[in-house]
Every structure is written in structure tokens, then in C-alpha cells.
Amino acid sequence: MFEAIQKLIEKYPRIIIHRHKNPDGDALGSQQGLKYILKENYPDKEVFAVGDLTPRYDFMLNAPMDEIPDSYYQGALAIILDCGSKALIFDERYSLADATARLDHHVFCEIIADAEVINTSFESCCGMITAMAMECNWKVSKEAAKSLYTGMITDSGRFRYDSTTSQTFRLAAFLMEQQFDTADIYRNLYVDDLSMIKLRAKYVLKIQVTTQGVAYIYTTLDEAKDYGVDNFTLSRGMVNVMGEIRGIHSWVNFTETENGVLCEIRSNYYNINPIATKYGGGGHQKASGATLKNKEEAMALLEDLKNLSGETI
């Protein structure tokens, strides 16, 4: 499955790894995991990882993101991970590379790279990197395994989401054989400051439910500024406070920013990806997102969700 990308990796002396903006655990885990793997299996190659950071996942990094000049892309391979569209890639300089490759598990939207492996059967991009390592007979260090396993946990919801399959557990078992400390991962992922727990409680009180059974939260720009945390925390970090309400099968979190309304859509039944795509976003069948122009467009998206939820379950 990964032959074309493996050949590119073996061909180029410098590899620069990109992923989507505002990284979640899977984006960071796949990026860091692949960097560790390539540096161990190809010690003569230069391997860099570039991108922005999300404070919640700082614990995953043993070193900061690499800062590199434009000239490094000459004669290099750029690998894009966990990203369904060009607009979501952090650092557009990937296009300066001599060759590009992409590994992604999102619903296909557009061609991005010279060589691509897009496979939605994987619960995470970290799962794809693990499968590639196994197929290519690469050594996987304890550090690489820990990064990849962390991303698998976050994108599978601790192996609860229906994207989790027998393949997921086979790949997770392979990673666990590298004998890293799983307790350290869970200690960092599922504890929070008291201030964040209080913020989550405020968001629970903001939940509104339509007559069609769609839950939603709308946070204005002024409210967002008053909360004093980053937009990623308010948007993706708060969407699942609506995720375990009996009778609710779709939910959406709207967050106003200076650059539009961030929209995180989730469902435990419906394929909501076409709705996200309609508004310029994308993602998975049951977890997608988009950036909208204004509140009017946000309410139009909500209407689409309400119409979708009119379908018989």
C-alpha cells in the first residue's frame, strides 16, 4: 500500500513533515512518530517537523517544532499528514519541495501531493503510520510507539468511536509491544486544571437543543475573549460536552473569531461530512469541521443539520 511513498523517502536526503493547523493528538502523534521512525531507520537523512502547537498536547513533544529556511525545501521531500485539504495544511512551503507525499484517513476532498495514500478504514493517521512501519519492516522505537499510540487514543476516543476496528487493536498491540508507559499518556490526556473543568461546566449550561434533536452551542466573539483561552480549546475542546446526551444524535459547536466562525460538527449516527464540505470544510463521516463567514452562515448550517436529523433512525 505504501510502496510509492517508501520509494520517495528512500530517494530524498532531506524530509520535511507537515500536518494540519491547530493540531490534535493524531496530527502531532503521526508527525512525531514518523519523525522518530525515519531518523532511526535512515540515520543519514535530515528529518524535520514543522507546524504550530496546541497547548493541550504540549506533553507529546520532546523538542519544539523545527524552524527551517525556504532553501531547505530544495531537493527535499515534503510529507503531509492527517490533512484532507490544502487550505488546512500548516506552512504552505510544502509546495516548494521537489516532491510531495500525503498520508491521510479523512474523506477524500482533493489531490494534494505527488504520491498519496488515502484510506478511511484507519481510525487515525497514527494507525496508518504504524501500518506503514510494519509493512516496510522499519524499527519502531519506544518514543515513536508512544507518540503513535497517543494519536490512536485521541482519534478513536479511547477506542470507543465506531471507527475502531479489529485492525485498530492489531496496530495498537504492535505499538504496545515496544513497552512504553501508557499510564503517562492517560495522566496527561485526561486531567485538567480546575479552571478548565469550570469552563466545561459553563459550556454545559450553554447547550441548546432544537426540536429535531440537534444540540448546539454558539459562542460570540466577546464571550470567547472573556474566557481567556485559545480558540482551539473553545471550539474542538468543548464540542463533546454535548456528546453523551440521550436522544441527541448530532451536535455542533460554533465559536466566533476575528477570522470567521469555527464550526465543529459531530454525530453518533449520521454522516455529517457532506454538510461540512458544503461550507468549505471536511473531515470524517461523523466528525467534521469548517470555518464559516458569519453567524448567518452558521445558522444555515444548523438548519442543514436539523433537516438531516429528520431522517428516520
Image (cartoon, helix red, strand yellow):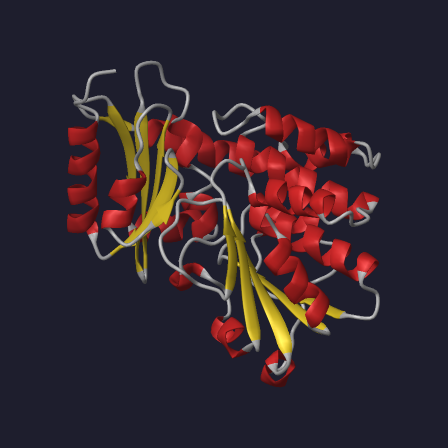
Q: Quadrant of the C terminus?
A: top left
Relative image position of residue 71 (x, y in whole percent): 62, 85
Residue drawn at 41 percent across, 20 percent down: 244
Residue at position x 41%, y 63% in the image? 86
Residue nearest the observer in this picture, 19 or 212: 19
User: 157 or 191: which is nearer to us?
Assistant: 157
Q: In the rendered picture of this protein, how many numbered marks are placed on residues?
A: 0
Residue in the picture at 61% in, 33% down: 153
Residue 196 placed where, x, y %? 53, 37
From the viewer's perspective, tell me whether residue 97 is left or right of residue 238.
Answer: right
Q: In this rendering, would 106 be left or right of 49?
A: left
* Residue 147 visible (yes or no): no
Relative horizontal placement of residue 286, taking residue 139 as reference (left or right)? left
* Percent x, y of residue 187: 71, 32
Q: Residue at x 51, y 70 (%)?
A: 91
Quarter of image, res 14: bottom right
> Is residue 182 shown to the viewer in this render?
yes
Nearer to me, 166 or 268: 166
Q: Quadrant location of residue 202?
A: top left
In terms of image quadrants, where is residue 46?
bottom right
Above or below 1: residue 201: above
Q: Nearer the viewer, residue 54 or 163?
A: 163
Compared with residue 228, is residue 204 higher up or lower down, i.e. above or below?
Answer: above
